[in-house]
Amino acid sequence: MRFMPTAALVFAASLATACGGPLEEEPRTADADVAGESIASQEQAIDESCVSPSVVLAQPDGAAVTAVFPTCGYQDASAASTDGSYDQTDCPHRFVTEVTGLAGNFAQPFVEVIPASTVNESACKGVAIGGAAFGYKNGAWYGLGSVSTTGTWIPPGLFFPNGFCVLRFNIGSGGTGYSKMRVTGFGAALGVFKTRVRTGVRLGTSSC
């Protein structure tokens, strides 16, 4: 399998998405090593290594699930980590879910942090969330986008009297034509302590 960098992760409190071609490996130069050394480029390399055939798709590091499409509405095909210990050589500090059986249908990748307890405003804004998605077709993996953000707090109001912490974020804008997708994710409370996460795809294109 060949690899090529796709879109760099942007670590900020916003979403960053990109689509690219097949992942291929290109030789690095000394100048590139110096000029391109950044958190974003390092995180991108980590995520792209997660499509390696040797990645473990079993707890606590990952999971393999089969897509079941709803007759109407939306449905997730996803898996959640048992705890925050996910870590493996080919995909460090990431929980990886591979969703098969897509048969070319539309799927929207996402990553979601699962908090250990009720989250208030300050704790919400201190949760770091990141992930990347890849689609497989014609014998190659394609980058579908990445996200790096923090929890988003919705102040108390009509719909959320006590406020609400948004900890689920889409990765890219989804895609069609893929037989399977891999979605990586990580979460960290206070930006340091790894938390449980859920990664996968949302299936369906319209409400009932």
Image (cartoon, rainbow, N blue to C red):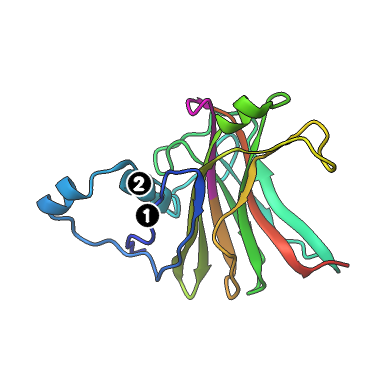
| Residue sticking out furthest to the left | 30
Q: Quadrant of residue 92?
A: top left
Picture residue at 38% right of the left edge, 44% below the top: 43
**Residue 186 shown in magenta:** yes
Q: Quadrant of residue 109?
A: bottom right
| Residue sticking out furthest to the right | 208
Q: How many marks?
A: 2
Picture residue at 33% right of the left edge, 60% below the top: 5
* Residue 103, position as x, y percentages in the image: 65, 73
Q: Which residue is mark 1?
A: 8
Q: Which residue is mark 2?
A: 40
* Residue 204, position as x, y percentages in the image: 75, 67
Q: Secondary structure at mark 1?
A: loop
| Amino acid type, callout 1 | Ala
* Residue 203, position as x, y percentages in the image: 72, 63
Picture residue at 67% right of the left edge, 30% below the top: 115
Q: Secondary structure at mark 2?
A: helix
| Residue 57 placement, left or right of 25 | right
| Pointer 1 with pointer 2, Cβ within 8 A | yes
| Residue 15 placement, left or right of 167 | left
Q: Could you give the CA–CA distance between mark 1 and mark 2, rounded to whole angstroms?
A: 6 Å
- Of labels 1 and 2, earlier in sequence is 1
- Give 164 or 117, whichever is nearer the viewer: 164
**Residue 153 shown in magenta:** no
Vertical position of residue 201 compared to residue 162: above or below: below
- Give 112 or 94, whichever is nearer the viewer: 112
Q: Is residue 131 visible?
A: no
Read off the magenta span.
184-193
Crowding at label 1, few (<14), some or many (≥20) Cα neighbours within 10 Å? many
**Secondary structure predominantly adopted by residues drawn in magenta:** strand
Q: Is residue 80 visible?
A: yes
